Image (cartoon, rainbow, N blue to C red):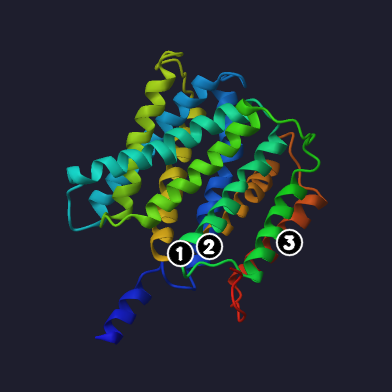
Amino acid sequence: MKEEKHDQKKKNIFSNYKFVPILAVFACFLWGSAFPIIKISYEELAIASEDIFSKMLFAGYRFLLASIFLFVWRLFSTGNKSIKMERKYLPFLTGLGLMQTTLQYFFFYIGLANTTGVKGSILTTLGTFFTVIISHYLYLDDKIDRNKILGLIAGFTGVVIINLNKGSFSFNFKLLGEGFVIASAITSTIAAIMVKNSKHKVDRILLTAYQMFIGSLFLIIISVFAVNPLSLNFSFKALFLFIYLAFISAAGFGIWFSLIKYNRLGYISIYRFIIPISGSLLSALFLVDESIGSNTIIALLMVSFGIVMINRVQRETPWV
């Protein structure tokens, strides 16, 4: 019986120690690729930098399509052809959709429009710190130790280094700028804890699909108060990029929520440092005004060191 349980766990790649880092890095790499693709999409769609509501409309459509991808995947990948959800799960899914999709991106788009890209990139990594610290107090098996502290410091330092030559970093603070970017990081942390603490036995693909579907509807409803829902003029290139963005949202969040279910939240969250690093690397490849410099190499080494540290077995008593 014990061997059977062991074999079942071994078959689950989301709990297999060999695959967890690979899947976490892959999910974060996908999210990082969204940064240059979103910028290119805005250029194709002629969305001005200050046009927040058009960006929210674009995001709403993106996550709506991502949820459809996941529903279709769920239908064809399992023997159970139903994607129905029991009504008792609706309050949880609505709350998760509002937190993970609607509020996070509402705060993020407005905040980023009112601060520099440098500060935005650095402040979004605060979500990792919030998650690790809160997990320390919520979960007995997810305590902060020396390796985790070193990993956090190395990862955050790498993110700061890669942004040093991309603009100024002043200490001015605006509620609608830096405040909203931090709020975005906080909502992401809350959403991760909601998924981790959920006692509902809901398939993680369906959970991701429904929260995206609900959250995207709220984004679309908010945006149409200011812009025409048909105002986005898709060219063939813009449509291709839009579909890719929907795909990475579906794949990224599907993998991430599954990893959260089977692993320690603080451990998984530290991999999020890869998002701004991969975003910078891919931006250098695809955007004319971006390039790879020595700061990028140093940042990659720092983040890699941080990930190695958090994967080391801590032999001493965790910090309490």
Residue placed at 46% from the left, 34% from the top?
Answer: 103
Q: Position of residue 29 (x, y in %)?
A: 56, 52
The image quarter in which residue 155 lies: bottom right
Residue placed at 69% from the left, 53% from the top?
Answer: 156
**Which element type, helix, strand or loop, lies under badge 2?**
helix
Q: Which of the numbered marks, if any, corresponds to residue 136?
A: 2
Q: Which of the numbered marks, if any, corresponds to residue 287?
A: none
Q: Is residue 157 visible?
A: yes
**Which element type, helix, strand or loop, lies under badge 3?**
helix
The answer to whether the residue labelled 2 contacts the one labelled 3, judged by CB atoms less than 8 Å apart, is no
Q: Position of residue 270 (x, y in %)?
A: 58, 58
Q: CA distance from mark 1 to mark 2?
A: 6 Å
Q: What amino acid is at disc 2?
A: His
- Please give the residue where the numbered disc 3 appears in the rendered image: 301
Q: Which of the numbered marks, if any, corresponds to residue 139?
A: 1
Q: CA distance from mark 2 to mark 3?
A: 26 Å
- 244 or 211: which is nearer to us? 211
